[in-house]
Image: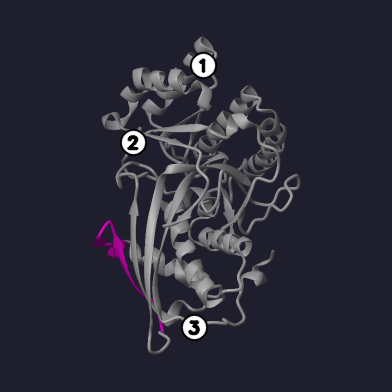
């Protein structure tokens, strides 16, 4: 599909008011997206596990205005309270997507949103938040264009979410979502995420992700700034090539369930992400001492126990511990005994693979 496919020509129905609620999950990338082009186009493809417990629930109450507004009309509430400081981000998002959802200025929107995880947990909510918001807007558009099919609905929701936060396009569906054009992955696109189209071994069907909250403070360098630093990065092209190669390598790994090969790729991707940060100009480090302590503990335990836990990292200090269902008891006991001590206030979140957003 092309950008032009997402520009509506005319709506077939009229609606005066309504309310819709969607719950959208976060996701954790296995092959990382780092660096982007104009209009939130990724500099390299990525693939992610959709999560289940870490999610944002967003409601939109929409009321048609008497006359089309000169600007967007909306109120924003986060966990029941007005959230004025977040409104500029929504304003920017609406300006980006207006061409694709031209009804926006015809309605007043009351947006109410909340997260299943604590606001100060150090878990980024941009992916789940923008995905939930995009889905609510797509519900309104489907009311206006009732002949829209489900596949188009999902693709366009992912397309819109990407314009709010790149990784949000991977939070519409589950459980394994690929985003960014890749020569070996049929149907892949820079415009939206797709369900991974090839065989996936049963060992990956119930994968767990325990998120260790190492540092709940605000990052000293935002992801947006970090992405932009890839433009003149001395190793950018090599990194983009590596991401393509790792996605190709994962095709037989997902099919065969060879966890040792999975671990090598996933951990290398996590460390490469942070290596790119450390080698940028200006350089920066988002890992903390306890991040490294956890990584070393994981390596020691994996060697001594023969289990298949591994780590991945987001663009921050937190550690995602990934492990298969059949090793849950042993790995979880290790996490409680050895790793929780390195978390801020002993906090962690138990999550697992999920299957995408849901209308509530």
Quadrant in the picture for residue 40: bottom right
> What mark, if any, has residue 215 been given in the picture?
2
- 128 over 346 or under it: above or below: below
Q: Are marks 1 and 3 in contact (CB under 8 Å)?
A: no
**Residue 91: x %, y % from top left:** 40, 69
Task: Quickly name the residue at label 1.
Answer: 302
- The residue that appears at 30% across and 44% down in the rendered structure is 118
Q: CA distance from mark 1 to mark 3?
A: 59 Å
**Left or right, 123 with reference to 13:** left
Task: Quickly name the residue at label 3.
Answer: 14
Q: Secondary structure at mark 2?
A: loop
Q: CA distance from mark 2 to mark 3?
A: 48 Å
Q: Nearer the viewer, residue 297 or 262?
A: 262
Q: Are marks 2 and 3 in contact (CB under 8 Å)?
A: no
Q: Secondary structure at mark 3?
A: loop
**Label 2 neighbourhood size at 10 Å, few (<14), some (14-19), many (20+)?**
many
Tag 3 or tag 2, which sits nearer the N-term? 3
Q: Which residues are magenta?
A: 70-85
**Label 1 neighbourhood size at 10 Å, few (<14), some (14-19), many (20+)?**
some
Residue lying at the far top of the rendered structure? 304
């Amino acid at each position: 599909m092309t950008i032009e496919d997402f520009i509506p020509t005319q709506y077939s129905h009229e609606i005066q008011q309504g309310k819709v609620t969607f719950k959208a999950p976060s996701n954790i990338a296995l092959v990382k997206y780092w660096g982007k082009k104009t209009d939130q186009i990724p500099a390299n493809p990525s693939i992610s596990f959709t999560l289940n417990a870490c999610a944002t629930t967003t409601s939109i109450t929409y009321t048609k205005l008497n006359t089309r507004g000169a600007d967007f009309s909306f109120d924003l509430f986060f966990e029941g309270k007005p959230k004025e400081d977040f409104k500029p981000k929504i304003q920017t998002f609406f300006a980006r997507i207006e061409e694709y959802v031209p009804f926006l200025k015809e309605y007043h929107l009351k947006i109410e949103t909340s997260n299943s995880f604590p606001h100060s947990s150090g878990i980024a909510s941009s992916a789940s938040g923008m995905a939930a918001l995009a889905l609510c807007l797509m519900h309104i558009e489907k009311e206006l264009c009732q002949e829209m099919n489900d596949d188009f609905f999902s693709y366009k929701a992912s397309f819109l979410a990407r314009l709010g936060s790149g990784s949000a396009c991977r939070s519409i569906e589950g459980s394994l979502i690929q985003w960014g054009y890749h020569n070996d992955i049929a149907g892949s696109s820079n415009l939206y995420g797709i369900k991974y189209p090839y065989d996936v071994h049963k060992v990956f069907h119930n994968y767990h992700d325990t998120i260790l909250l190492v540092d709940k403070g605000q990052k000293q360098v935002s992801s947006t700034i970090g992405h932009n630093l890839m433009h003149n990065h001395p190793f950018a092209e090599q990194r983009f090539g590596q991401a393509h190669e790792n996605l190709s390598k994962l095709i037989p790994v997902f099919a065969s369930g060879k966890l040792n090969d999975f671990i090598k790729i996933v951990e290398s991707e996590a460390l490469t992400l942070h290596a790119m940060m450390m080698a940028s100009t200006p350089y920066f480090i988002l890992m903390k001492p306890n991040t490294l302590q956890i990584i070393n503990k994981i390596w020691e335990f994996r060697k001594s126990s023969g289990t298949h836990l591994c780590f991945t990292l987001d663009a921050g200090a937190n550690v995602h511990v990934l492990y298969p269902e059949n090793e849950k008891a042993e790995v979880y006991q290790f996490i409680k005994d050895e790793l929780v001590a390195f978390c801020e206030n002993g906090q962690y979140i138990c999550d697992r693979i999920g299957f995408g957003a849901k209308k509530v």
